[in-house]
Image (cartoon, rainbow, N blue to C red):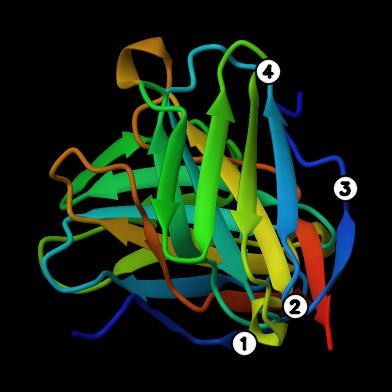
Amino acid sequence: DQQVKQNSPSLSVQEGRISILNCDYTNSMFDYFLWYKKYPAEGPTFLISISSIKDKNEDGRFTVFLNKSAKHLSLHIVPSQPGDSAVYFCAASAPKLTGGGNKLTFGTGTQLKVEL
Amino acid sequence: NAGVMQNPRHLVRRRGQEARLRCSPMKGHSHVYWYRQLPEEGLKFMVYLQKENIIDESGMPKERFSAEFPKEGPSILRIQQVVRGDSAAYFCASSPGDGTYEQYFGPGTRLTVT
């Protein structure tokens, strides 16, 4: 039962353009969402997060949008840089009382390639 | 401020042997999580520990796997009698335990069972 889905296994974008990575979830109890970036042979690096009480959070070149009614979130990277080439994972957390309690549920990732 | 440390980075075990994976959380972090990533998949939660306590082990296989986070020293994920299907990357993460959701990951241990 894949509760967090990233339906695009890969995405290719030109340097300087916008990268948009998408994520859908099925568990309506999720109340906090995070994006991680992962390079090969390294651990995931935290990028940005958003609480379910918000619909947007911005940090430099990274913006996360949350659409609760559609159970959809997206990560925008503007402008994209070659160093952004990595696998991006969406993750979600549910409150402890609903069976969550700090554990993160991850999507399967999207490989972003930023080309020169 | 050192990040999450894991060792060894690579571990090769023959079927039937034991694997011990270690994790030292970030300084000031009291919560530790273990995740497993199989090839071509996302990370799957295994266990959540605080010092001397297992808080949530709902993702741990019922047999052969155990975890601890003693009062002193690193957290240990132990896999007894390893099988080929245990080959994966095992990641440890830590958080400060102050109600924040963000978890910070170590570089992982890549376990290969031959």
> Where is residue A7 drawn, in percent x and y?
86, 40
Instruction: Identify the residue at image location x=17%, y=46%.
Output: B97
Q: Could you confirm whether marks 4 and 2 are on the same chain?
A: no
| Amino acid type, callout 1 | His
Which disc, if any, is residue A8? 3
Q: Are marks 4 and 1 in contact (CB under 8 Å)?
A: no
Q: Which of the numbered marks, if any, corresponds to residue A26?
A: 4
Badge 2 and badge 3 both on one subunit: no
Q: Is A3 drawn above or below residue B21 in the view shown?
A: above
How far, Cα to Cα, is label 2 from label 3? 28 Å
Specify the quadrant that holds the C terminus of chain A: bottom right
| Number of disc labels | 4
* Disc 1: host chain: B
Chain where mark 2 sits: B
Frontmost of labels 1 and 3 is 3
At label 2, which amino acid type do we have?
A: Thr
Label 4 and label 1: CA atoms lie apart by 35 Å
Do the CB atoms of the residues marked 1 and 3 lie less than 8 Å apart?
A: no
SS state under label 2: strand
Circles 2 and 1: CB atoms closer than 8 Å: yes
Q: Which residue corresponds to the image point at 71% horizontal and 73% vertical from the top-left? A: A86
Amino acid on which disc 4 is placed: Thr
Q: Give the chain of mark 4.
A: A
Along the line of sight, which residue is nearer the eye, B68 or A58?
A58
User: Is A109 or B46 nearer to us in this picture?
Assistant: A109
Q: Where does label 1 land, which residue?
A: B10
Element class at badge 3? loop
Which numbered tag is attached to residue B112?
2
